Each structure stands twice: as C-alpha cells, then as structure tokens.
Image (spheres, rainbow, N blue to C red):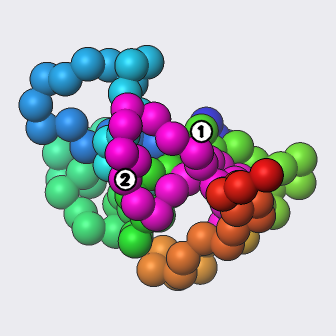
Amino acid sequence: MFDEFSKGIVFSGVFQPNKKLGLIYCTNRPTSIYYIREPQFGKSFVQSESYILNLGQGDFLQMFPKFNSDYSKLVFFGSEKNFLSHTGNYQLRQFDWPIVDPSIKSKILIDLVEEI
C-alpha cells in the first residue's frame, strides 16, 4: 500500500527460509512491516541499509497494515510472541505516522482478551 504522498510503499513480509504450508493454514511465522520510502530500481539501491526500513523491531508478528483516513496512524494486527498452535489471538497496534525513528515500538490499541 502507498504512503500519504504515494511515494513510499508499506507492506508486511514473512521470513520463510523453508517451504512450509501457506499463510492460509499457519500464520505462526515471523512477520514484519517494512517501509520503502521512495522505490528505486537497481541493485545498488536495494543493498542500502536505509532503503528498506523494518518497523517490526521486537515483535514476532505484524500483518495487515492500514492507514487511517488522514495518514497520521498506521494500524495493524500483531503479536509479541509466537503462538502454541498454527494461529492465535492478535493485538491491534499502531505506529504514529510518519515514522521518525524505526526503533520505536508500536502502541497497543486493543490488547489480548485472556478471560471473559
């Protein structure tokens, strides 16, 4: 998805070194949200450390990123730990946008419900 000025791209990427069942069957995989500020083409841009920002520092899973209507918040589903099974409960989390420091952790909007 594009950022507020349609110059950058925000997406979630899955770390998957081996072939496994698809995400439709198992979402218990390390997943992070990435931000590419201004996409360029060529190998020299991709090699740069600052070209792709990993926003998932410290979280195990971050998926389904969406901006709010004025692009001031980036909201997503996430989890700090892996699950005991193939899927589990997610937290609703957010980043303030634009990202100033990628090492800042996301805020929890709705936490996990342990008991009813």
Quarter of the figure with residue 105 = bottom right
Residue 73 colored in magenta in the image: no
Q: Residue at x 79, y 52 (%)?
A: 116
Q: Which numbered tag is attached to residue 64?
A: 1
Give percent across and percent down for residue 111.
Answer: 70, 62
In terms of sequence position, does the residue under pointer 1 or pointer 2 come before the other? Answer: 1
Q: Residues within 10 Å of mark 2 (few under 14, many from 20)?
A: some
Residue nearer the viewer, 11 or 37? 11
Horizontal placement of 70 versus 98: left or right? Answer: right
The vertical placement of 25 against 115, above or below, is: above
The N terminus: image quadrant: top right
The residue that mark 2 highlights is 82
From the viewer's perspective, is residue 30 above or below residue 18?
Answer: below
What is the secondary structure assignment of the residue under circle 2? loop
Q: Which residues are magenta?
A: 75-95
Nearer to us in this view, 64 or 91: 91
Q: Which amino acid lies under the numbered mark 2 shown in the image of this protein?
A: Asn
Gap in angstroms between the C-alphas marked 1 and 2? 17 Å
Q: Position of residue 92 (x, y in %)?
A: 69, 54
Residue pictured at 24% horizontal, 51% vertical: 46
In the rendered image of this protein, does residue 103 appear above or below residue 28? below
Within 10 Å of disc 1 (Cα), the crowding (few <14, some 14-19, many 20+) is few
Q: Nearer the viewer, mark 1 or mark 2?
A: 2
Q: Amino acid at mark 1?
A: Phe
Question: Is residue 45 left or right of 83 when viewed as pictured?
Answer: left
Nearest the viewer among 11 and 2 is 11
Q: Which residue corresponds to the image point at 66% horizontal and 57% vertical from the top-left?
A: 114
Circle count:
2
* Residue 96 image position (x, y, % from top left): 72, 70
